[in-house]
Amino acid sequence: MNDHMTMRNALIATLLLTASCSSTTSNNNDWPAYANAGGTRYSPLTDIDRTNVGKLEVAWTYHTGETSFEKDSEQKSTFETTPIVADGVMYLSTGFNKVIALDAATGHEKWTFDPRVDRSGDFSEVTSRGVAYWAKGKRIFEGTIDARLIALDAATGSPSKDFGVRGTVDLTEGIAHPRFGDYQVTSPPAVIGDLVIVGSAIGDNGAAELERGSVRAYDARTGALRWTFDPIARELHSGAANAWAPITADPESGMVFVPTSSPSPDYYGGLRLGKNELANSIVAIRAATGEVAWHFQVVHHDLWDYDIATQPVLVEVRGIKAVAVGTKMGHLFFFNRATGEPLFPIEERPVPASDIAGEEAWPTQPFPTMPPPIVPSQLKPDDVFGVDDADRAACKSIIASLRHDGMFTPPSIRGTLQVPGNVGGMHWGGMSYDPVHHIIVANTNRLAATVRLIPRADYDADRARSKGERIFGEYNRMSGTPYAMYRTILLSPKGVPCTPPPWGALTAIDVNSGKVRWETPFGTVTRIPGLPPNIGSPNLGGSATSNGIVFIAAAMDEIFRAFDVETGKEIWHAPLPASAQASPMIYRAGGKQFVVIAAGGHGKLHTKRGDAVVAFALK
């Protein structure tokens, strides 16, 4: 086929896709997609404002019934869902992929669907962050932790029998050696036009050659495969580079923005030398054809598990339609949506070399000049925190034993201090965008971590020696490489982070100037006595903005908060029945504006567990 024919066909496909997208738009009362339109987590509703937000109270509470956490897999279970609302109906999912439809005004249950995930399985993650809605076909789509893509009738919850096989597409088809429990879907699919697009979550530290992180587009009506994007070069002894964070659809341009993760395994790249170009990248794909329009790699040859964990956000920068990309390193990048051109200069700066035989760390890494990094990237012995002198001395001793030459210090046998740690920085909670005030709000973690490579012959003895030593520690074999690994949050002997507080913060960035507008410690840690109230909490989950207000839970406490988007001042808070490692959403139903949060706690974060969906409204 000649170039003119190819261009013409691509143009026709894009025009058809864009035309069909117009039928999927919803009114401002709804919240029809995870993170709402363009990943912004923004609602234009104005019933609740900065003068009356203090009058919010619980309007209704719904309990999912998923409250049993005895089994190993259920200990990992989390309730990270962000509900969606379309045509007055709320749809949400639980950790084991039960889909629930509620009357959005009252919280009364309309229907439920249980895909009957095998709970005895050993899952890397037990979570579902939400479902997707196809307005044209009135369908709900969910990706499951056992690697299925399911289509349901939005009105009844019954499987859509003309989609795939009796409503289901098996996502392991076409994927080499998929492992049950390690090849999953944890984020909602993206819907654009008549396509449903899905990535995957991969347990990417277990071995070198794992499942490939293919992103696939399916016909939303039939389940037929339309295209596949594979970020891993075929000749590499690697896998993953998967899009486990949410994919962002842009109906106006007909593109989807895919955030990819690190190649496997995370901490040793001797079998995948080079940049690993499409891993750790924001990839702009023409949804109609699957063609890559542009991409930018935020980490070259990742050795730190610095996935792009945040959903790309569609913003406007000085009148230019842009996409914002947040990272675990605390770097925030802005690109022209159409061309991929950076809207603030990016510098390639030298970074430390590896001291591991066979490893070739990339000599430079990209650093945005604006905005500045919103988390620290270095930890010196004199800066450590501790509850007393002995605790601080122990933290200093630990740091002195580790290799640390600043950000991007490669993993080592000696042990490497990683600042920020693999949890972030910015994480899967993502960012929210207020287009009226031109502000992006991001919540971050500020915890250092340590990572240690273990020669293969020493692995079993090393693991046996430190069994039960640290509750947050994690071993992985990285099979097929010369090394296994151990990583953990940097904690004192009393279990307190050695990193100076705040351990969690909320930051607002002006998208036009790239400057930080304000920053405030966020959340409290009540389980450690004697800590000051403004210590800032490790957090998972995100924020939402509306009418000059930022709503967020996410911290380790059981509190839902509101902040002034222009000043960062806390203007409201309310207790929750459990910790909320989830992101809020906002909508209007029955003539009333609601703000909703899922409060179910987090197994890995060891916060208070529960099963509540809590809706707040004005008195």
Image: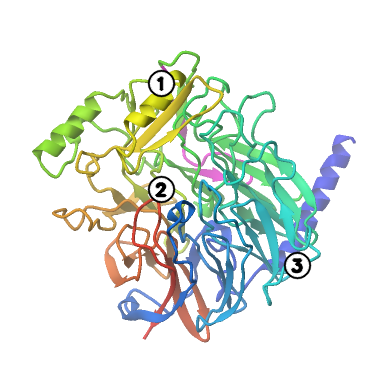
Q: Are marks 3 and 1 in contact (CB under 8 Å)?
A: no
3D distance between C-alphas at marks 2 and 1: 51 Å
Counting from the top left corner in percent of width and height, residue 427 is at: 44, 48
What's the residue at 30%, 54% (across, down)?
A: 518
3D distance between C-alphas at marks 2 and 3: 48 Å
Counting from the top left corner in percent of width and height, residue 436 is at: 45, 64
* Quadrant placement of the N terminus: top right
Q: Secondary structure at mark 3?
A: loop
Q: Secondary structure at mark 2?
A: loop
Q: Give the mark, 2 or 1, whose residue is nearer the N terminus.
A: 1
Q: Which residue is mark 2?
A: 513
The answer to whether 49 is drawn above or below residue 197 in the figure is below
Q: Which residue is mark 3?
A: 160
Which secondary structure type mostly characterizes the magenta part of the structure?
loop
Q: Count how many numbered circles sit on residues in the image.
A: 3
The answer to whether 272 is drawn above or below residue 49 in the figure is above
Q: Which residue is mark 1?
A: 458
